[in-house]
C-alpha cells in the first residue's frame, strides 16, 4: 500500500492526519502524533483478543470499560497499531470527560473533510489537464504569442463547412476541404466596455493575398495570392490555413486579427446542447425543404441538429441570400452569449462541465491561445463586456457589378465600409458607452484657434506608410496653408496612434492643426515643443499607425453610419 496509508509502519489513516485544533479553530496536518500538540486524542488501545475473534467485552474483560466509556471511544482518534502501554500501578484509568466525545467527533470530521478537499483539488487538476488535452491547435503565421489582458484584442471566428464529425455527412459541400463559410471579426475594447462583432460575407469578392503556411515538418511555404475571389476561398483552397484568412481580413479591413478560433458543424450542435438550448425567434412559421428546419412563429428553443439547421437556413429568411443568413447567425450568437453568461448556466455544475467539454472539443485555435489557461482568460475578459454594448454588424457591401443581371456576389461599399473599419481599428464603440475621455481632455479642443499660416510644426513619420511625413507636408502647405511646416523623416520609434506635442503657449496652434487634420483630443499632448531649423519653437507631429493618407481625418467616426444596420447582444430580433 501507499506509504501514507494503512500499510506503513505506524499504520496511520491519512484522513486522521488532519485534525481540528480547538484552541485555534484551524485544521492542522499532524504527521507526528507524539509532538505534544494540544487536544489531540491519544492512541487507541487494541484488545488482547486473538485476530479475527469476535465477542463481547465483559465486566471483567481486559479493557473493563463501562458503557459510557465505550461510547466515548466510538469515534476513533489517529489509528495506530502498537503494543498497549502499561497503566501506572495502583491507578485506574480516569473516566473521560463528556465533552471529549464531541471533540473527537470534530477531529474525525475535520480529518475527513480535509482529505476530501485535497482529493477534490487533485481531481479538479486532473480534469483541467483532461480539458487541456481536448483543445486542437494549429500553428499559423501572424497570430500573437499568448494573450494580454490589458489591451484591446481582435479575435477572428471562422465557421468551416468541412464535413467532419459523426452525423455531418449530409451537410456542406461533399469533398470540401473546408472553406471559411462563416466569418466574424470580434473586436473587444481595451477598457472592456464594448465589443463589436463584424461579419464578413463569404461571397464578398476580394483579392486573396499571398500567405505563408507551416508544413508538418515545421518549414514555411508561401502560397501565391489570387485576385477577385470569394472571401471563403481564403481557407482550404490551395492549402490555405486560418492564417491566410487572417491575412485576408487584414487586407480587406485594415484590422489585424490577433488570434483565431475555428469551429465546424459539431461545434454548433454540442455548444447549443451544452447550455440547454438557445432561444431564437422567427417572424413567421418556417418549414425549409433544404435545411429541414421546422419552427412555429415566435420564440423557440433550439439545440443540436435543429440549432445547426437554424444557422444553415437561407431560403426561408429575407431575400434568401447569404446576407440575410448572416443576420440569423448574429441573432443566434447574441442569444447564445446571453445563455452562456446567465445565472442558470454559471450556477449549474452540470452545464458548466458540459460547456467546458463541448467548447474545448469543438474549437480549433492558434497555438498562441492553445491552452485552457488562455481560453479561460479570454472568456473572463469577454464576460466583462455588458451584452447591451456587444454590437453585431455586417461589412457594408454593394452588389458586384461584374455579375451582370443576376447578383451572386458582393463587393465592399467604398463609402460606408471604411467608416466602420476605422471605428473598430481605433477602438470606438458602435453603442453608447460612458465617455472615455475626461472633461479636461475633451476641453483641449475647445478655445481659440490660430490662423493656419501661424501654425509652426515639425512632422515625423512613426507609421508603416513610407513617405507619410512628406505626403502630409505637401498637403498641409499646398492645400491648407500651413506654410511654416517641416518634415524631418522617420520618428525614433513606431507609434500606433498619431500624437501632437506642444508647449502651453502653442495651444491655439494645436487646436488649429487638430481641426485641419481631424485629430482626436487624445492625440494632443501638451508639454513641450522643439526648435525648428530657424531656431523657433515648433510643435511635434508624429504620424502613427492610424495614419491612412494625407487629408484623411485621423480621428475615427464617433458613430456608425446611419444607414448601416446593426444589433446588440442584449436584444432578441425575430428573423424575417
Image (cartoon, rainbow, N blue to C red):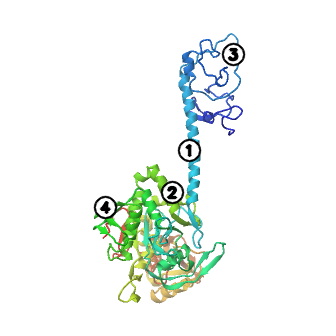
**Would you call the spot at circle 4 few (<14 residues within 10 Å), some (14-19), or many (20 or more)?**
some
Instruction: Look at mark 4 in the image and give the residue it sits on.
Output: 299
Residue highlighted by disc 2: 357
What's the CA distance linking mark 4 and mark 2? 28 Å
CA separation in Å, label 2 and label 1: 19 Å
**How crowded is the residue under tag 1: few (<14 C-alpha within 10 Å), some, or many (20+)?**
few
Alpha-carbon span between mark 4 and mark 3: 80 Å
Q: Are marks 4 and 1 in contact (CB under 8 Å)?
A: no
Dividing the picture into quadrants, the one containing residue 71 is: top right
Residue that label 1 marks: 120
The residue where tag 3 is placed is: 87
Mark positioned earlier in the residue sequence (1 or 3): 3
Task: Say whether disc 2 or disc 3 marks the residue closer to the N-terminus.
Answer: 3
- Note whether 294 is above or below 398 in the view shown: above
- The answer to whether residue 303 shows anywhere in this view is yes
Distance of label 1 from label 3 (alpha carbons): 42 Å
Q: Is residue 150 left or right of residue 52?
A: left
Q: Secondary structure at mark 3?
A: loop
Q: Residue at x 41, y 66 (%)?
A: 308
Amino acid at each position: 500500500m501507499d506509504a501514507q496509508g494503512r500499510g506503513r509502519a505506524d499504520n496511520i489513516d491519512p484522513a486522521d492526519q488532519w485534525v481540528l485544533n480547538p484552541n485555534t479553530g484551524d485544521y492542522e496536518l499532524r504527521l507526528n502524533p507524539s509532538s505534544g500538540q494540544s487536544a489531540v486524542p491519544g492512541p487507541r488501545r487494541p484488545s488482547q483478543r486473538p485476530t479475527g475473534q469476535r465477542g463481547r467485552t465483559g465486566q471483567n474483560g481486559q479493557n473493563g470499560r463501562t458503557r459510557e466509556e465505550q461510547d466515548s471511544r466510538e469515534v476513533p482518534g489517529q489509528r495506530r497499531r502498537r503494543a498497549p502501554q502499561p497503566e501506572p500501578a495502583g491507578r485506574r484509568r480516569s473516566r473521560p470527560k463528556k465533552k471529549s466525545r464531541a471533540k473527537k467527533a470534530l477531529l474525525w470530521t475535520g480529518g475527513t473533510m480535509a482529505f476530501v478537499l485535497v482529493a477534490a483539488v487533485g481531481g479538479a487538476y486532473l480534469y483541467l489537464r483532461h480539458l487541456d488535452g481536448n483543445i486542437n491547435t494549429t500553428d499559423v503565421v501572424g497570430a500573437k504569442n499568448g494573450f494580454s489582458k490589458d489591451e484591446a484584442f481582435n479575435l477572428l471566428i471562422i465557421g468551416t463547412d468541412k464535413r467532419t464529425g459523426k452525423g455531418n455527412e449530409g451537410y456542406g459541400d461533399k469533398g470540401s476541404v473546408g472553406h471559411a463559410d462563416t466569418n466574424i471579426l470580434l473586436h473587444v475594447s481595451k477598457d472592456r466596455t464594448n465589443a463589436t462583432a463584424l461579419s464578413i460575407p463569404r461571397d464578398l469578392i476580394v483579392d486573396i493575398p499571398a500567405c505563408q503556411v507551416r508544413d508538418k515538418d515545421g518549414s514555411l511555404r508561401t502560397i501565391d495570392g489570387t485576385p477577385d475571389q470569394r472571401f471563403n476561398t481564403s481557407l482550404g483552397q490551395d492549402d490555405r490555413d486560418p492564417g491566410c484568412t487572417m491575412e485576408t481580413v487584414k487586407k480587406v479591413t485594415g484590422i489585424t486579427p490577433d488570434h483565431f478560433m475555428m469551429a465546424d458543424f459539431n461545434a454548433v450542435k454540442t455548444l447549443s446542447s451544452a447550455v440547454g438550448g438557445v432561444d431564437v425567434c422567427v417572424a413567421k412559421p418556417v418549414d425549409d425543404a433544404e435545411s429541414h428546419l421546422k419552427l412555429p412563429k415566435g420564440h423557440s428553443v433550439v439545440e443540436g441538429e435543429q440549432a445547426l439547421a437554424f444557422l444553415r437556413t437561407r431560403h426561408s429568411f429575407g431575400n434568401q441570400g447569404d446576407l440575410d443568413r448572416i443576420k440569423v447567425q448574429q441573432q443566434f450568437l447574441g442569444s447564445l452569449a446571453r445563455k452562456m453568461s446567465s445565472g442558470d448556466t454559471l450556477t449549474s455544475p452540470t452545464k458548466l462541465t458540459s460547456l467546458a467539454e463541448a467548447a474545448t472539443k469543438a474549437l480549433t485555435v492558434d497555438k498562441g491561445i492553445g491552452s485552457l489557461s488562455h481560453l479561460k482568460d479570454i472568456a473572463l475578459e469577454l464576460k466583462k463586456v455588458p451584452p447591451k454594448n456587444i454590437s453585431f454588424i455586417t461589412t457594408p457591401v454593394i452588389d458586384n457589378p461584374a455579375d451582370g443581371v443576376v447578383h451572386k456576389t458582393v463587393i465592399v461599399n467604398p463609402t460606408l465600409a471604411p467608416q466602420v473599419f476605422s471605428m473598430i481599428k481605433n477602438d470606438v464603440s458602435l453603442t453608447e458607452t460612458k465617455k472615455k475621455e475626461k472633461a479636461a481632455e475633451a476641453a483641449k479642443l475647445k478655445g481659440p484657434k490660430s490662423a493656419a499660416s501661424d501654425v509652426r510644426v515639425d512632422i515625423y513619420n512613426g507609421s508603416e506608410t513610407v513617405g507619410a511625413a512628406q505626403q502630409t507636408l505637401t498637403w498641409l502647405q499646398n492645400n491648407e496653408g500651413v506654410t511654416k511646416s517641416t518634415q524631418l523623416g522617420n520618428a525614433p520609434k513606431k507609434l500606433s496612434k498619431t500624437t501632437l506635442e506642444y508647449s502651453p503657449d502653442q495651444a491655439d496652434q494645436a487646436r488649429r492643426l487638430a481641426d485641419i487634420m481631424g485629430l482626436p483630443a487624445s492625440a494632443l499632448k501638451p508639454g513641450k515643443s522643439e526648435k525648428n531649423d530657424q531656431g523657433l519653437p515648433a510643435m511635434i507631429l508624429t504620424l502613427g499607425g492610424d495614419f491612412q493618407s494625407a487629408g484623411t481625418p485621423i480621428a475615427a467616426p464617433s458613430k456608425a453610419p446611419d444607414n448601416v444596420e446593426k444589433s446588440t447582444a442584449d436584444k432578441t430580433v425575430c428573423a424575417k
